[in-house]
Amino acid sequence: MSILVVEDNPISLKILDINLRENGYEVITASNPKDALDLLETMPAIKLIVTDIMMPEMDGLEFISNIKANAEWKKLPFIIISAMSNKKTVKKAISLGCQHFIVKPVQSAQLLKMVRSILPQQKLIIRNKQQSASKMGLDLASFQKIANMFADMLGKEMVVLENELAQGKYKNFSINVSQLRESVTTLQAERLLEVIDRIEQMTSEDGKRSVWNITKDYELLLAEMKLLHNALTISVDV
């Protein structure tokens, strides 16, 4: 499940992107509402929209109105971000069904609290690095070294798995899922762990699943490995 962030200011967009990704969320960004609407057409996994209000061509309120008019998207929750806090804007947003507002400059803790309240069951790509480091008894620099080491290993596994899928392989994949589980559990990578659970259960039910289903599970595994790889290699100093 993804969070769509819509913000025309590139610095503000980057800050929101990093804040959310560093705390384990899958993020898709758009610099204007038109691009955001195009993304919604092609990415049904979007479950939350974080949007600025003051944007050129189509402002945030018009953007929200367009989404609420679409039967497939009208139940999507919003977090509205704006440098303005005037009552007229808030009243209009409330009338469109919005309940969550943040006034710029955005405080990371406030944003994350809202996201967690809206998506309480959302499994994370990886836990916050500072929290993970503390739980493992490491400082942040040491944790990043371990994260980079695992990212290198993950990258090699991804190349092999991607090639095997491209060649049409559907069983006896080279990847050692059990070994992968150990590292993934240590790093609290919940989404990838969930896929591994599914594959291990599938392995115990060999012969009961179609080739198509098996292939789809390994394609999902590859997709989640890529997300985790990206999360692990985000620099803490960005």
Image: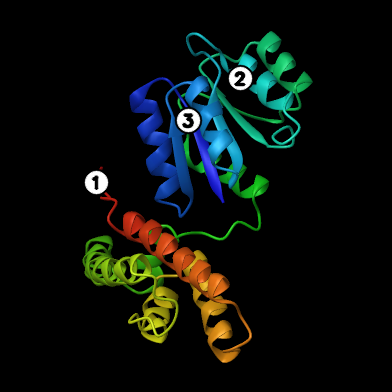
Position in image of residue 186 (x %, y %): 40, 76
Judge by depth and name the residue closer to the eye, 22 or 180. 180
Q: Which mark is residue 63?
A: 2
The correct choice, above or below, for 185 with respect to 233 in the image is: below
- Crowding around mark 1 (Cα neighbors within 10 Å: few <14, some 14 to 19, many 20+) is few
Look at the image and tell me whether residue 5 can be seen: yes
First in sequence: mark 2 vs mark 3: 2
Q: For mark 2, give the secondary structure.
A: helix
Residue that label 3 marks: 106
User: Front-most of 238 and 162?
Assistant: 162
**What is the CA distance from the residue labelled 2 to the residue labelled 3?**
20 Å
Above or below residue 95? Residue 79 is below
Residue under the point 40% across and 85% down = 172
Label 1 sits on a secondary structure element that is: loop
Q: Residue at x 24, y 46 (%)?
A: 237
**Residue 24 spot, x, y in % from top left:** 46, 55
The kind of residue on which mark 1 rests is Asp
Q: Which residue corresponds to the image point at 44% horizontal and 62% vertical from the top-left?
A: 224
* Place of residue 202 in the rendered image (x, y in percent of width and height, measured from the top left): 57, 83
Residue 67's mark?
none
Q: For the C terminus, which image quadrant?
A: top left
| Among numbered discs 1 and 2, the one appearing first in the sequence | 2
Q: Which amino acid lies under the numbered mark 3 shown in the image of this protein?
A: Val
| Residue topped by disc 1 | 237
Disc 3: CA contacts within 10 A as few (<14), some (14-19) or many (>=20): some
The three-letter amino acid code for the residue at tag 2 is Phe
- Kindly indicate the quadrant of the structure image that contains residue 96: top right
The image shows residue 131 at horizontal and vertical percentages of 42, 62
Instruction: Give the CA separation, mark 3 to mark 1.
Output: 19 Å
**Lower sequence index among marks 3 and 1:** 3
- How far apart, in angstroms, are the residues tagged by discs 1 and 2? 33 Å
Q: Are marks 1 and 2 in contact (CB under 8 Å)?
A: no
